[in-house]
Every structure is written in C-alpha cells, then in structure tokens.
Image (spheres, grey):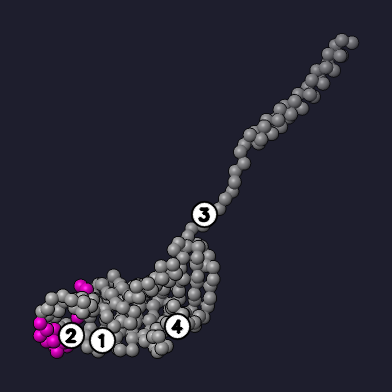
C-alpha cells in the first residue's frame, strides 16, 4: 500500500515538472520584454534641398513693379517660391526672360538666362548659364554668371564677361555696371577699339581728380594704350 502511494506521488511530481519549467520560461520572457526600452523608428531628417516649394507656377508671363512703378516683365516656364530654405528665394530652374522698362514704360533692355534665383530678403538676383543682355543702344553683354543687386541698382560678375557695343568689344574677368548698362567697367580686360577712340583718350590733358573724373573712372579704367585683337 505504501509503495503504491509512493509511485502515485512520483507520477504527480513528474507531471508538475513541465508545468513549472513552462511557467519559469514565460515569467523570464515577460520580465525581459518589460525591461527592454522601446525603440522609436524615425526617418532621416529632411535636408534643406529637399524642402518643398510653397508655390509652384507654370507658364508665367507677369509684370513686376518696383516702388510702385512697373519695371519688368518676367516670362518663364516654371516659377518656384521657397520660403523654407535659408535664405528664402524664388527659383527659375527652367530659364527666365526679362523685359526691362523705364519710368514711362518704354522698353530698355532684354535679359535672358538658363537658370535664375531671386533672394527676396536681399533683393538680389543670381543668373546662371547662358546669360545675355541687350539694350536699346545696341550693347550686348554675355557671361556664364551675373548678379543683379536690386538695392544698389547694379549688375556685377566675377567670371569671364564680354561686352560688345557699336564702337568697341571688351572682355574681362570682372564686370560692373548700372542697371541701364550705360556706365560700366571691365577689369583684367582685353579688347578692340576704334583708332579715333584711342586718339581722343591720348589728347585729353591730365587734370586733378574731381567728381566728374571719378564718375568717368567708374565707366572704365584709366586711359591707356590698347592692342588691337
């Protein structure tokens, strides 16, 4: 009788052992999960160049005013306004064409570029690619890059530029001009000039600097003999 009871106790103990092992495994897994810190799955940060434009307009043909006076007509295939990037800007990645007017709305010049950016806070245009300007006086300007300062009302470039007028041709690595392309200078330059133009410069007497002379020096460097190319 005692031996039978002993065998029954062993069978109960053997049946209880797997249950205890399973309970221990479940408790251990639950404890491990509870102690593991949750991990956040985040995407990569958005880079400034990935910022989406606030406005995109296609097939633009519009007039732009300055101080209440219509100064320009802009024609472009695509116009993006991006206020997220710093500095904020307008982008013309499909090229741009300007018509420039005077105060009486008379056409003064054409301006064209393959790509353009306008930094509205600085009132600064950056024109890239095949930059061309032609005014009503016959001046033709070409370069690969040109800046247009809307505060100082001037153009300038630090890359190779070419200026062709009915009287002369000038080339140089620095260019600066007023908005009307009437007063300009080209430094580190080379070019061809009319013989009469050179003689007039040689015959001018030397005088002390004054305001009018300073203004003339802004137009072009001091008079010097030039080779014909």
Q: Do the numbered discs 4 and 1 sit on residues whose CB atoms are within 8 Å?
A: no
Q: Is residue 55 above or below residue 11?
A: below
167 displayed left or right of 80: left
Q: Give the CA distance from mark 4 to mark 2.
A: 36 Å
Work out whether residue 142 or residue 155 is closer to the camera in this orientation and state it. 155
Does the CB distance between marks 4 and 2 fall below 8 Å?
no
The picture places residue 209, in percent across and down from the top left corner, at 16, 75
Q: Nearer the viewer, mark 4 or mark 3?
A: 4
Circle number at residue 45: 3
Question: Distance of mark 3 from mark 2, alpha carbons?
Answer: 57 Å
Element at badge 4? Answer: strand
Looking at the image, do the residues carrying marks 1 and 2 touch, with CB atoms under 8 Å apart? Answer: no
Q: Is residue 100 left or right of residue 139?
A: right
Q: What percent of the width, then of the height, locates residue 109?
A: 36, 85
Q: Earlier in the sequence, mark 4 or mark 3?
A: 3
Near mark 4 (Cα within 10 A), the count class, few <14, some 14-19 or many ≥20, is some
Which mark is first along the chain, 2 or 4? 4
Residue under label 1: 165
User: For numbered disc 3, what is the local secondary structure?
Assistant: loop
The residue indicated by pointer 4 is 70
Q: Residue furthest top?
A: 2
Q: Earlier in the sequence, mark 4 or mark 1?
A: 4
| In the image, residue 173 lies in the stretch drawn in magenta | no
Q: Which residues are magenta?
A: 187-205
């Amino acid at each position: 009788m005692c031996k039978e009871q002993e065998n029954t106790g062993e069978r109960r103990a053997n049946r209880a052992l797997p249950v205890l092992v399973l309970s221990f495994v479940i408790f251990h897994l639950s404890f491990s999960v509870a102690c593991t810190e949750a991990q956040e799955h985040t995407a990569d940060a958005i880079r400034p160049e990935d910022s989406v434009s606030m406005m995109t307009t296609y097939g633009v043909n519009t007039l732009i005013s300055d101080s209440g006076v219509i100064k320009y007509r802009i024609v472009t295939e695509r116009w993006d306004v991006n206020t997220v990037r710093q500095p904020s800007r307008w982008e013309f990645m499909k090229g741009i064409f300007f018509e420039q007017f005077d105060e009486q709305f008379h056409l003064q010049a054409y301006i064209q570029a393959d790509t353009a950016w306008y930094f509205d806070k600085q009132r600064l245009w950056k024109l890239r690619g095949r930059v061309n300007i032609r005014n009503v006086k016959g001046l033709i300007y070409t370069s690969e890059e040109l800046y247009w300062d809307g505060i100082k009302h001037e153009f300038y470039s630090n890359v190779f530029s070419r200026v062709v007028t009915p009287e002369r041709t000038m080339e140089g690595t620095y260019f600066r001009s007023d908005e009307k392309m009437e007063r300009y200078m080209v430094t580190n330059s080379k070019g061809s000039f009319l013989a009469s133009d050179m003689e007039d410069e040689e015959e001018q007497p030397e005088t002390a600097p004054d305001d009018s002379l300073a203004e003339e020096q802004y137009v072009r460097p001091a008079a010097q003999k030039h080779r014909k190319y």
